[in-house]
Image (cartoon, helix red, strand yellow):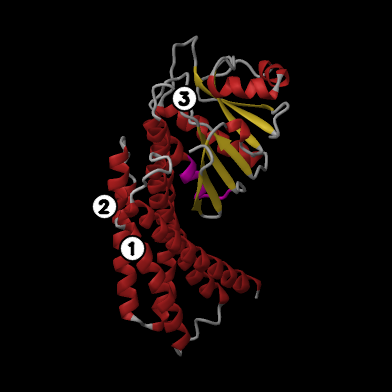
Amino acid sequence: MGNRSSDYVINATTFRVVYGDITKVVAEALVSSDDSLLSMGGGVSMAIERLGGEEIRRHARKLLPLRIGDVAVTSAGQLPAKYIFHAVTIDYSKFESPSEKSIHSATLKCMQLADVLKLRTIAFPALGTGVGRFPFQTAAEVMTRTIGEYLTGKTQVELVTIALLARERVQETDLNLFYEQAVALASVSCQTKRLASLLDELRGIIEPIHRKDLLERVEGLRTELFHAQDVLAEHPSSLEQIEQQQERSAIADVSQRIVTMTTQTQKAIKKSKVSVWGDRQLEEEVMRTKLNGLLTQINIKVSQMNKFQIEKAKYGGIDVPPRLENAIEDLNRDIQGLEADVSKAREQLAALMGS
């Protein structure tokens, strides 16, 4: 599992899961999980201090005192990053352990700091799950939703990475698969919200050409998207619940039908005698809707692919069931086809915006 990584897309940002040591991740900011004294006494914080050198500790001492949920910024010492973001998840003096609130607070502050410092890349560990012994399922759900929701707004961050390293008490495949699916769920959920917003704009584009059939389809898809949002907004506590959420939301089918409808809308407007297509902004909105529908489909396919890849890893390359190999091959073809469609849509959108 150590060499694998997988990418999801939220708006213009890549949300990546990698398996291994965070100190080996290339990013401008590395996030450390530590206590309120920044003692760097174990887990991720110890590894960062050991490789980054005494400079990190000297800088950290100047930033005390800190409270749980705070984030302190130091240099990265000898590490190739620019900064270390020290997320406080434990306060021994007040007997406070990691909580959903503190992990949400620290995660959000790290993302905000990345934008304040005009960073493009940031890497997180699984906050609070090492020395803090916080349940990795809850940490995954809180972190991925916090990051996902932040990325739906305006941000300069281009790549967010979560680096996973198995801990005592936690099976590697359990940790990896849960975070993998949690990131996928957050990515799909956030793209779904974006699609709902774009469908509202698409309705305004269709109305002037008096295509009742297309308007009815938009309304139907909006209703289905709202249902999907409600389902995807639930807070799962197990892998089974995450997998059931995506299936119950039916977002795979809805996003596919949205892409089909945008193509039909383009054709209908071009044939229309109503002068709406002269405004390039209208054409851009249709293309944005199509692009986001395609990105949602890719996130769903990548989620399915990585579930199979993790299952395949259990066999160690020996006697892998043919049904698993075939499923991976089929998904690879689907993803490649969707990526080609995304590339074409991006080119068309860029041409419209430049004309």
- Report the residue at 58% width, 37% height from top: 123
The vertical placement of 134 against 17, above or below, is above
Quarter of the rendering occupied by the C terminus: bottom right
Q: Are marks 2 and 3 in contact (CB under 8 Å)?
A: no
Q: Alpha-carbon distance for marks 2 and 3?
A: 31 Å
The numbered disc on residue 254 is 1
Asked whether 16 falls inside the magenta stretch, the response is: no
Q: Position of residue 33 (x, y in %)?
A: 54, 25
Q: Secondary structure at mark 3?
A: loop
Q: Is 199 drawn above or below residue 78 in the view shown?
A: below
**Image spot of residue 324 (x, y percent):** 35, 51
Give me the residue at 51% from left, 63% from top: 339
Residue linked to disc 2 = 248
Q: Is 109 left or right of 256, judged from the image as shown?
A: right
Residue with the most extreme bottom position: 273
Q: Is residue 165 above or below residue 213?
A: above
**Amino acid type, callout 3:** Gly
Residue 274: tell me if it is visible.
no
Residue 193 appears at what percent x and percent y? 41, 54
The kind of residue on which mark 1 rests is: Val
Disc nearer the start of the sequence (1/3): 3
* Numbered mark located on residue 128 in the image: 3
- Give the extent of the magenta segment: 147-155
Label 3 crowd bin: few (<14), some (14–19), many (20+), radius 10 Å: many
